[in-house]
């Protein structure tokens, strides 16, 4: 059973938003690496002082191994993430429901 995983990272959302255009090639490379590591779906959301990552992964262990990569942690800081506060990670079983779309 795949896992839905959310990660809330505190930080400078203006820097993050700018990085989406300025570092698009880096985001595309990371996405390709994530798919190879077991990511099935990926989205970002921006809140008040935080970025929300919403992913689906084949399993939690693959996500943890990928998210823990030092180069990814460095990139998160580069794009405005404040890793002095631990990201809030929530892992759930992905299920289907009659109202799913």
Image: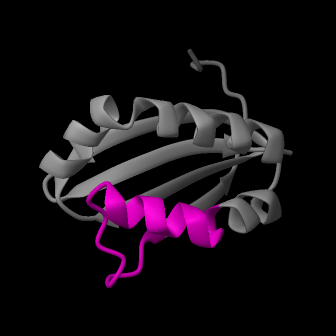
Q: How is the protein colored in the picture?
A: one colour
Quadrant of the image containing the C terminus: top right
Q: Is residue 64 shown above or below 24?
A: below
Q: Residue at x 33, y 40 (%)?
A: 45
Outermost residue toward the right in this view? 1
Q: Residue at x 58, y 65 (%)?
A: 71
Outermost residue toward the bottom in this view? 84
**Residue 85 versus residue 6: which sits nearer the camera?**
85
- Magenta residues (range): 67-88
Q: Is residue 9 shown above or below 95?
A: below
Q: Residue at x 50, y 68 (%)?
A: 73
Q: Position of residue 56 (x, y in %)?
A: 66, 41
Q: Position of residue 64 (x, y in %)?
A: 70, 67
- Is residue 77 found inside the magenta-colored segment of the image? yes
Q: Is residue 76 shown above or below 28?
A: below
* Number of numbered labels in the structure image: 0
Q: Position of residue 53 (x, y in %)?
A: 45, 48
Q: Residue at x 22, y 64 (%)?
A: 11
- Is residue 71 found inside the magenta-colored segment of the image? yes
The picture quadrant where one finds residue 2 is top right
Outermost residue toward the top in this view? 101
**Residue 37 versus residue 53: which sits nearer the camera?**
37
**Residue 75 versus residue 11: which sits nearer the camera?**
75
Quadrant of the image containing the N terminus: top right
Q: Position of residue 47 (x, y in %)?
A: 20, 48
- Left or right: 56 as drawn, with respect to 12: right
């Amino acid at each position: 059973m795949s896992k839905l995983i959310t990660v809330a990272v505190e930080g400078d959302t203006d820097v993050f938003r700018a990085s989406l255009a300025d570092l698009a090639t880096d985001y595309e490379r990371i996405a390709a690496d994530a798919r190879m590591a077991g990511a099935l779906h990926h989205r970002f959301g921006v809140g008040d002082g935080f970025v929300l990552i919403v992913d689906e992964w084949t399993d939690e262990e693959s996500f943890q191994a990928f998210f823990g990569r030092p180069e990814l942690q460095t990139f998160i800081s580069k794009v405005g993430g404040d890793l002095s506060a631990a990201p809030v990670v929530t892992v759930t079983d992905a299920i289907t429901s009659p109202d799913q779309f």
